[in-house]
Image (cartoon, rainbow, N blue to C red):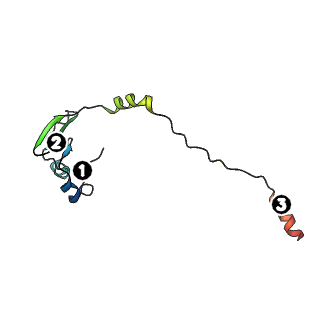
Amino acid sequence: MQRPDADLLNSALKANLRVRISGRQADATNAKVAGVLGAEEIDAAARGRMKIKIDDVREFQAYFLDEEACKEMLSPYKTPVKDPEPQLEVIPQSIFGLLGKEEQR
């Protein structure tokens, strides 16, 4: 989950965003950083409840899927990722034979 942070949402970015959407925030400071005053007042038990600010702030109910339901729905589409083994060509060579040739010179 992302949380609002003044470093992430700088004033230049916020000035160019007309619409702001926020879920429940921990406190008024985070709601202010997100740009949706009152987002801290959303009931924690109301899953999927959000606030949107276009001209004024309105509350709406978004779809809510818990993490387990998401995993179950996406599992047929997941494929295991296997790191490929590097294909290294190993050439057997005796270092002692090379040393012997060097000594003969």
Q: Nearer the viewer, residue 65 or 13?
A: 13
User: Closest to the observer: 15 or 7?
Assistant: 15
Q: Secondary structure at mark 2?
A: strand
Residue drawn at 87 percent across, 64 percent down? 100
- Nearer the N terminus, badge 1 or badge 2? 1
Q: Position of residue 20 (x, y in %)?
A: 19, 46
Whole-number angstrom distance, CA of label 1 to CA of label 2: 15 Å
Q: Earlier in the sequence, mark 1 or mark 3?
A: 1
Q: Quarter of the image for the N terminus: give it.
A: top left
Residue 28 in the image: x percent, y percent? 15, 49
Q: Mark 2 sits on what residue?
A: 52
Q: Position of residue 84 (x, y in %)?
A: 58, 43
Residue in the picture at 24% in, 50% down: 4
**Residue type (three-letter) at the residue carrying disc 2:** Ile
Label 1: few (<14), some or many (≥20) within 10 Å?
some
N-term mark: 3 or 2: 2
Mark 3–mark 2 distance (CA, rounded to whole Å): 76 Å
User: Which quarter of the image is occupied by the C terminus?
Assistant: bottom right
Q: Residues within 10 Å of mark 2 (few under 14, many from 20)?
A: some
Q: Which residue is mark 3?
A: 96
At label 3, counting other C-alpha atoms closer than 10 Å, the crowd grade (few under 14, some 14-19, many 20 or more) is few
Disc 3 on helix, strand or loop? helix
State which quadrant residue 21 falls in.
top left
Give residue 78's quadrant in the image.
top left
Q: Is residue 87 above or below residue 81?
A: below
Q: Single out the mark in the foreground, 3 or 2.
A: 2
Q: Mark 3: which amino acid?
A: Phe
- Residue to which mark 1 is pinned: 4
Of 37 and 27, nearer the camera is 37
